[in-house]
Structures are given as structure tokens and as C-alpha cells.
């Protein structure tokens, strides 16, 4: 087995950094273990950025070495793997398997395509409304992106839009906004959403209904701004394309036939889960238990198989999530939170009283970081974890900052930035758009996401978030 020069150099640097940490003088509140912990985190991030190791393996290695060097005990380094958030994510992935196999997403989308006007604007609205409805009960972004993009391509062809045309690109971006970006507004919308909730301090815990109510103004403003932008930049020119034939949509619905028992059973279980997620504050039944009960029922009714469970749950993502969810606990154990508060306090203090400026600064910083750190998930979770002490000192709910980071960071200025956008493009088989067609859509996402956060600030203040 041959190791590339790049990987060998990366591994050597990864060994040198912890050794250097042994000789760095420390001051209160840090200890030698604290410096070692920071060094190992730097190594993991360096390996991720340079592609030395996959994200999940870099974080797993970090946690293992922290235990080997007695930087933190095993129970702290691997605490996340027994957390409610971790099991919520696992349950969500099981739900995604059944939901994606059932055909519910396509059926819901076709229904709203039939109801909404057969125009360019009408079909964009159909995609956004469909995404709003299906995202809470289909937690897999990849599954939604693949199915919805294929549907968008068929719609584009039926409306007579040529590949890479304004109309085709606008429909694609509208579909992506509806089925992928809007899902950021639901705790059950993706595994990463659950991870963001998982890094919240115990006294600032976020439940399903809390997430939805806080995210609702952002979703509304983001959807409005996105539709306006798509109409400005991608509205088909006169003579380009035709209105979508109602007969075409009905034909698609007829081909699916009436709802099969499998679909009805899946829908019933998912709707029941959604009801209990919403009622969590009143029933006292945690979202994790609800997700696991749905997981058990879906499997018991053979709505997904053990083989599908083995093949379709992204176990590398599960390891990655467990590693990052451990970071707040590791930071607290090593007093890194206190050190961050002391170091960043004077720098960030002017932003504490001006959240408009804070969000604008975060938007710039996150956008620049995303050119270096490939993963939006790593960017969001890392910066949110670092800013937890800042939020605690200044009376800002950490979820406000984490949610803003989460929504803003999902850009795709570079082709390697977002796997979901690449998966969506691939699902169109090159017959609707290619990557260069949708790059400007990242600008629309960044501006609309940031602006939606800024517009929502007064509402979030009324909700007591700052």
C-alpha cells in the first residue's frame, strides 16, 4: 500500500503539532491538557481541510488520541454517542429510508404542481410549498435533492425550456430552495439540524417546536426574497418556453396510481411522528423517542429492510456527528470556554449590542472560510461551538447565532462546497443545468439567507432570543 506524499506530510505535521503543544507555556484558565486538546482539534481540522483524512476519520482520530494522551477521559470524548441527539439522528436516517422509498415526495410535489398556476412563477411556488410540507418528514437532504431535481428536470422539459436556459436554471434553483434550503427551518429536516440543536447548552435546549417557531420568520422572508430574485434574474424571456400542461401533470399522477398500502402506512407513521414532535412540550415525550418509535414501526411493518438499513444509513456521517457533538463537553472539561471568553470578549464586545453587524460579520467570515473548509457542517458546528461562551456572556441565545451560521454557510461558490447541489445537478443527467449555470444561485442564497436573518431580528427579540 502506497501512501501519497501529501498524506505523509499531513500525518507528520499532525504528529509535530501535539509535540509542540507539550512545550507551550500555559496560563489560567488553561492547563497543559487544554493546550493539547486545542492542538489535536487543530490537527483534525487541518487534516479535513487538506483532505488527509475524511471528516469522520479525522474527528474519530482526534477523540481517540485525546483519550490515549489522557487529555480527556473516554466518557467525555465519546459522550455524544450516548446522547439523545445522536439517537435522534439515527432515528431520522431510518425514517428517511422508508420515506424516500415510498414515493411520497413525488406525489406531494405533483399535487401542488397541479394546484398552482402552470407558469414559471407558479411552478417555483409549487416546489417551495412542496418542500415546506415534505422536509419535516423526510430528513434526508440527499434523498430530497435526487428525487426533486429529477422532477424539476421533467417539468423543465415539459415547459419547453432548453438545458442551461434562464427558465431551466430558475426552476432548478427554485426546486433546490424548496426541497433543500427550506429544510433548515425544521429540526427534523436533516441530520445536521439535529447536530446544531445538540451543541446547545442544557439550559438552552431546542425542541422541535422551538426550532420551527424561531425559524418560521426566516423561512417566510427567505422564500419571498428567493422568489423575487429568481423572477428578476431567471424569468424566461418572451417566447422562451410554454405554460405547463395540466394534462401532463395529471398524466404523471395517473402513472403513479392511487396510494398503495405501503405509502399510506408510511404517511400515517410519519404524520403521527410529526404530531408528537410538535406536541413535545405538552406530552413530555422527547423528539428522540418519537423518532425511534417511528423507526421501529416502519421496520416492523417492513417499510424498510435490514439490508437497506445497512446500506443506506451513512455511518461515516454518524461517526462525524458524534465527534463534533462531543466538542462542547470537551471544551467545558478543559476550560477552553473560559479561555475563549477571555480572548474573544474584547474583540467581539462591540458586536454584542449590534446584532445586525454581528450577522453581517458572520456572513463575510463564513463565506471566506467556506473557500477553505469544504464542509458547511464543519464550518457551522465549529464556529457555533467557539461562539457559545460569547453568547452566554452577552445574553444572546446561542441558537440565534448557530441558526444564522447554519443558514448562511450553505453556499456553493466552489463545486466542492455542497454535495447536495452536486447530487441535484447529477440527478438531472446534464439535461437541465450544469454547475456553472447555478453558481450565481449561491449569491442569491447568501444574500437572501443573510437578509432574512436581519429582517427576522426584531421578531427574535420579541421572542427573547437577545
Image (cartoon, grey):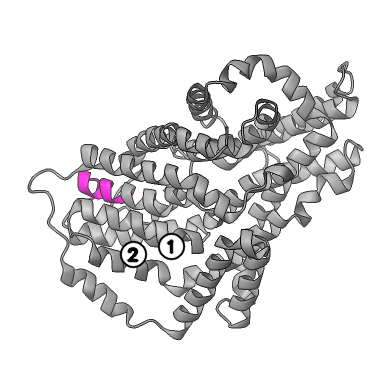
Sequence order check, earlier mark of 2 and 1: 2
Residue 300 pos. (x, y %): 63, 81
Q: What is the span of residues highlighted in magenta in the rendered image?
A: 163-172
Closer to us: 226 or 74: 226
Camera sees residue 5: no
The dominant secondary structure in magenta is: helix
Which image quarter is the C terminus in?
A: top right
Camera sees residue 141: yes
In the rendered view, would you say 297 is above or below 227? Answer: below
In the rendered view, would you say 412 is above or below 308? Answer: above
Residue that carries the numbered disc 1 in the rendered image: 134
Residue 380 pos. (x, y %): 58, 37
Disc 2 to disc 1, C-alpha distance: 9 Å
Left or right: residue 110 compared with residue 45: left
Closer to us: 356 or 417: 356
On residue 109, which mark appears? Answer: 2
Closer to us: 143 or 341: 341
Mark 2 neighbour class, 10 Å CA radius: few under 14, some 14 to 19, many 20 or more: many
Asked if disc 2 and disc 1 are in contact, CB closer than 8 Å, the reply is yes
On residue 439, which mark appears? Answer: none
Residue 11 pos. (x, y %): 75, 34
Q: In the displayed orientation, state which residue is furthest to the left.
A: 239
Q: In the displayed orientation, state which residue is furthest to the right.
A: 70
At horizontal 89% and vertical 25% (from top left) the residue drawn is 31
Callout 2 secondary element:
helix
Q: Is residue 167 magenta?
A: yes
At horizontal 50% and vertical 77% (from top left) the residue drawn is 268
Mark 1 neighbour class, 10 Å CA radius: few under 14, some 14 to 19, many 20 or more: many
In the rendered view, would you say 221 is above or below 272? Answer: above
Amino acid at each position: 500500500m502506497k501512501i501519497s506524499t501529501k498524506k505523509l506530510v499531513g500525518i507528520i505535521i499532525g504528529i509535530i503539532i501535539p509535540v509542540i503543544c507539550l512545550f507551550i507555556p500555559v496560563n489560567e484558565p488553561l492547563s497543559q491538557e487544554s493546550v493539547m486538546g486545542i492542538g489535536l482539534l487543530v490537527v483534525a481540522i487541518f487534516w479535513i481541510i487538506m483532505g488527509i483524512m475524511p471528516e469522520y476519520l479525522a474527528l474519530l482520530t482526534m477523540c481517540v488520541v485525546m483519550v490515549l494522551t489522557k487529555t480527556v477521559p473516554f466518557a467525555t470524548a465519546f459522550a455524544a454517542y450516548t446522547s439523545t441527539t445522536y439517537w435522534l439522528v439515527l432515528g431520522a436516517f431510518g425514517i428517511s429510508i422508508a420515506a424516500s422509498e415510498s414515493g411520497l415526495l413525488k406525489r406531494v410535489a405533483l399535487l401542488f404542481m397541479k394546484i398552482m398556476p402552470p407558469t414559471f412563477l407558479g411552478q417555483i411556488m409549487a416546489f417551495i410549498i412542496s418542500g415546506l410540507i415534505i422536509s419535516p418528514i423526510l430528513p434526508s437532504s440527499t434523498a430530497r435533492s435526487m428525487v426533486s431535481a429529477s422532477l424539476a428536470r421533467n417539468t423543465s422539459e415539459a415547459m419547453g425550456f432548453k438545458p442551461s436556459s434562464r427558465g431551466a436554471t430558475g426552476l432548478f434553483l427554485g426546486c433546490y430552495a424548496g426541497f433543500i434550503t427550506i429544510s433548515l427551518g425544521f429540526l427534523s429536516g436533516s441530520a445536521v439540524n439535529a447536530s446544531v440543536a445538540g451543541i446547545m447548552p442544557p439550559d438552552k435546549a431546542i425542541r422541535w417546536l422551538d426550532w420551527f417557531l424561531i425559524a418560521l420568520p426566516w423561512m417566510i422572508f427567505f422564500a419571498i426574497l428567493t422568489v423575487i430574485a429568481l423572477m428578476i434574474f431567471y424569468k424566461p424571456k418572451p417566447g422562451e418556453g410554454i405554460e405547463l400542461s395540466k394534462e401532463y401533470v395529471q398524466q404523471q399522477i395517473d402513472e403513479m396510481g392511487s396510494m398503495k398500502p405501503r405509502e399510506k402506512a408510511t404517511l400515517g407513521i410519519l404524520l403521527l411522528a410529526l404530531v408528537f414532535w410538535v406536541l413535545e412540550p405538552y406530552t413530555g415525550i422527547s423528539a428522540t423517542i418519537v423518532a425511534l418509535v417511528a423507526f421501529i414501526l416502519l421496520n416492523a411493518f417492513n417499510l424498510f429492510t435490514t439490508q437497506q438499513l445497512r446500506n443506506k444509513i451513512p455511518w461515516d456521517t454518524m461517526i462525524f456527528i458524534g465527534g463534533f457533538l462531543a466538542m462542547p463537553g470537551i471544551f467545558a472539561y478543559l476550560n477552553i470556554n473560559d479561555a475563549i471568553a477571555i480572548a474573544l470578549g474584547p474583540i467581539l464586545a462591540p458586536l454584542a449590542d449590534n446584532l445586525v453587524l454581528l450577522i453581517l460579520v458572520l456572513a463575510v467570515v463564513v463565506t471566506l472560510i467556506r473557500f477553505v473548509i469544504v464542509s458547511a457542517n464543519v464550518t457551522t458546528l465549529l464556529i457555533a461551538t467557539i461562539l457559545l461562551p460569547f453568547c452566554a456572556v452577552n445574553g444572546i441565545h446561542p441558537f440565534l447565532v448557530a441558526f444564522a451560521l447554519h443558514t448562511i454557510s450553505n453556499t456553493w461558490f466552489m463545486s466542492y462546497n455542497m454535495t447536495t447541489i452536486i447530487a441535484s445537478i447529477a440527478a438531472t443527467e446534464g439535461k437541465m443545468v450544469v454547475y456553472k449555470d447555478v453558481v450565481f444561485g449561491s449569491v442569491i442564497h447568501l444574500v437572501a439567507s443573510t437578509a432574512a436573518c436581519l429582517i427576522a431580528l426584531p421578531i427574535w427579540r420579541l421572542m427573547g432570543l437577545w
